[in-house]
Amino acid sequence: MKTVISVFCRSGANRNGEYGVSVRVQHGRLKLDVSTGITVSERFHGLSVPRKEWNSTAKGKRLLRTVAALDEYLMANPRMPEGEMRKNIRLIVTGKTPAEKVLADYVEEYAGRLADHTAGIYRLTARKIREYDARADFFSADEDWLAGFRSFYGEMSDNGIAIHLRNIRTVFNWARRKKLTDRYPFYYYKIKEERIPPNNLTVDELRKLRDYPVEPWQEVYRDIFMLSFYLAGVNVGDLLLSPGLRDGRFVFRRQKTGQYVDLPVVPEARRIIEKYKGRDHLLSVMDGRADYHSFMRRWNIALKKIGTQEVVPDKIGKRRKIIYHPLFPDITTYTARYTFASIAANDLDISEVQIGRCLGHSWSKTVTARYIADDRSKVDMVVRRVAEYVNG
């Protein structure tokens, strides 16, 4: 009985411009294509993943192992019924069958409980798990498995892989609460992370940005950055998706954690809100937008162009190319959050607990904390003190 096992790239790219890699099995009259879960930026033929492809060595080894396992299975089971053979081929390639769920499935299930942006990060974690070990379940994902997962993505930074490991840890905790497993590989496995210095502005730098004579088109981006700062460094999504103030206060639940946040609106913030008042959202920059990500990208680019500029000759010698000399080359929308926290702590000596309340962090997880009413006047005091200090 003739058997042919081949690897091929799908003809159509996904929305990220990547091509899915599949395995084709022809065994007698059986013909079956199964996706491996691996994606590549450029199509190729055979088992040799191009060296310029990210993580090419690991992907190539994974494909070799898969083809070898299929070859061994088909040689040992040449006359198995076609239905059973199809099921087992899929199990070898993907590690799952319709009747069983693996770790990546549970990560995706958990993602369905989250806001869009955070859910997308968990779904990326699920894809990473399938790329490394599609058959992994709660039993097999032990400490050695976690170490192997970390090693498999050795080209990623410590903080990059830590995101996925933390997501896996969160899903284990969720599964334990639901009694899906009693295993927990993170008792002794420590997630390695590198502390990144906060990307904050000093109070003098913030004042310089606030008062800088920006180009007319830059004004909205600078103003909304300052608004984010005055609202205790509120996250971009929470700010842009806000439907409006509630009884004159900025009240919302954080997309990331679901934490309830109730902030005062200082006069400086109120003036910016009135200047850019939206129809269906707090701010007009969201009028007619389906999501906030496109504006956020433009916002980040615009912030890095605030500063001096010069016109220089382009490739054909005409003076029409603009070179920007930014005030703060590393500034991002998130800098407002770092800046609020840093000024509150370093300049005003406000406690970490009070700053955490302003930022929407869970201020205490102790039993005692359940009996203590959350005094919003303390949050109001911190926000007002920081705003007055910057503008005083």
Image: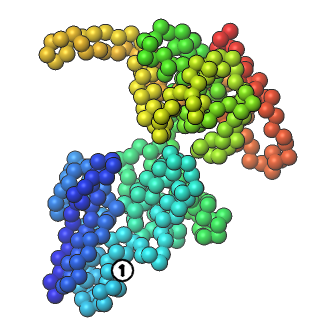
How many numbered callouts?
1
Image spot of residue 56 (x, y percent):
26, 53
Q: Label 1: which residue?
A: 87
Q: Quadrant of the C terminus?
A: top right
For residue 95, side relative to residue 380 (left or right): left
Q: Quadrant of the N terminus?
A: bottom left
For residue 319, side relative to residue 270 (left or right): left
Label 1 Cα neighbours within 10 Å, binned few <14 / some 14-19 / many ≥20: few
Please tell me whether residue 96 is drawn above or below residue 388 in the rendered image: below
The amino acid type of the residue labelled 1 equals Lys
Please tell me whether residue 232 is drawn above or below residue 76 in the rendered image: above
Image spot of residue 240 (x, y percent):
55, 33
Q: Quadrant of residue 270?
A: top right
Res 298 visible: yes
Q: Quadrant of residue 244?
A: top right
Give the color scheme: rainbow, by chain, secondary structure or one colour: rainbow
Farthest residue toward the front?
279
SS class, disc 1: helix
- Which residue occupies 59% across, 15% down? 203
Image spot of residue 108 (x, y percent):
49, 60
Say which of 139 and 203 sits in front.
203
- Which residue occupies 54% across, 19% down? 223
Q: Quadrant of residue 30?
A: bottom left
- Which residue occupies 67% across, 23% down? 344
Image spot of residue 248 (x, y percent):
73, 27
